[in-house]
């Protein structure tokens, strides 16, 4: 029997319809006030997740809201680690007030991409997480430096792929500036998810087919047609017994 798929979405960012998305996904990665979000958006997302029995994760990024955390910053690893830990603490405090637990960490945007390429950066961040939040899992791009670092530190890893993003042949996300890097056609999004779920494969931008062990799929809330994509993906997976 095929392993069931988890659907996750990046929420609490002040973009899209979080409450509608929380009726579709099974995990919610909630922005912690770095690249986006504030106490009110965090609390609303946590309450919505609880109401829909959705697993809650922390979604910290560079403290760079003007660029939505999508600009690469050259900062000391210790500074990045401290920013991540501070953002997790902010979300965890609100979650505790609402009677919720933070199950996992998922890095955002440019920080996530840099950590996916740089195992030393991932180790610096994740070692801080392991020390301060033992038992917290890492939701990370499958077969990336993030996954390797989390495994080396003995952390639980949830391997992730993206419903609406294109890939390079080495299994990393294609830069958003590249043509075709964001999938906006619902049928293409569904096809990518089904190929991954059923065959463990992803087709890169250049046509290369590579294997992926991801069993959590991210649905971006800020992609054009996000809710349509999410509903179609969930229906396709459920109809095949994969959720």
Image (cartoon, helix red, strand yellow):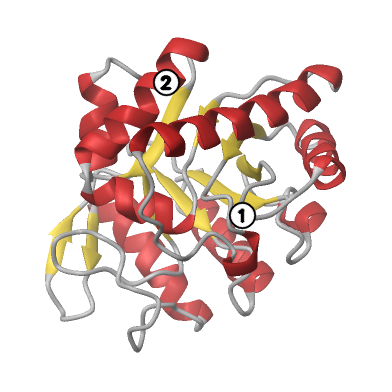
The answer to whether residue 41 is left or right of residue 142 is right
Q: Which residue is found at the position 68% from the left and 68% from the top?
A: 227
Viewer-proximal residue, 126 or 24? 126
Residue 83, x across and y down, in percent: 54, 36
Residue 192, x across and y down, in percent: 36, 67
- Decide: few, some or many residues near mark 1? Use Cα within 10 Å; few <14, some 14-19, many ≥20: many
Residue hosting label 2? 128
Mark 2 vs 1, N-terminal side? 1
Viewer-proximal residue, 120 or 228? 120
Tag 1 secondary structure:
loop
From where the camera sits, is residue 158 visible? no
The answer to whether residue 243 is left or right of residue 212 is right
In the depicted structure, whether residue 103 falls above or below residue 168: above
Residue hosting label 1? 35
- Decide: few, some or many residues near mark 2? Use Cα within 10 Å; few <14, some 14-19, many ≥20: some
Residue 239, x across and y down, in percent: 52, 55
In the depicted structure, whether residue 178 falls above or below residue 195: below
From where the camera sits, is residue 93 visible? yes
């Amino acid at each position: 029997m095929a392993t069931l798929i988890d659907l996750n979405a990046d929420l609490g960012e002040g973009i899209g319809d979080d409450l509608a998305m929380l009726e579709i996904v099974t995990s919610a990665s909630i922005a912690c006030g770095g690249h986006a979000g504030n106490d009110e958006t965090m609390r609303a997302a946590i309450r919505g997740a609880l109401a829909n029995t959705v697993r809650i994760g922390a979604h910290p990024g560079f403290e760079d809201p003007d660029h939505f955390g999508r600009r690469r910053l050259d900062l000391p690893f210790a500074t990045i680690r401290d920013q991540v830990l501070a953002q997790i603490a902010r979300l965890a405090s609100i979650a505790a007030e609402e009677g919720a637990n933070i199950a996992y960490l998922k890095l955002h945007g440019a920080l996530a991409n840099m950590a996916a390429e740089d195992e030393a950066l991932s180790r610096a961040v994740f070692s801080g997480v392991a020390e301060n939040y033992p038992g917290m899992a890492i939701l990370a791009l499958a077969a990336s430096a993030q996954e390797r670092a989390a495994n080396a530190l003995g952390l639980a890893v949830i391997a992730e792929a993206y419903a609406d993003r294109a890939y390079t042949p080495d299994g990393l996300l294609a830069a958003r500036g590249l043509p075709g890097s964001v999938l906006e056609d619902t049928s293409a999004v569904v096809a990518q998810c089904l190929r991954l779920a059923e065959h463990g494969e992803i087709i890169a931008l250049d046509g290369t087919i590579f294997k992926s062990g991801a069993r959590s799929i991210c649905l971006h809330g800020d992609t054009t047609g996000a809710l349509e994509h999410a509903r179609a993906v969930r229906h396709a997976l459920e109809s095949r017994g994969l959720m």
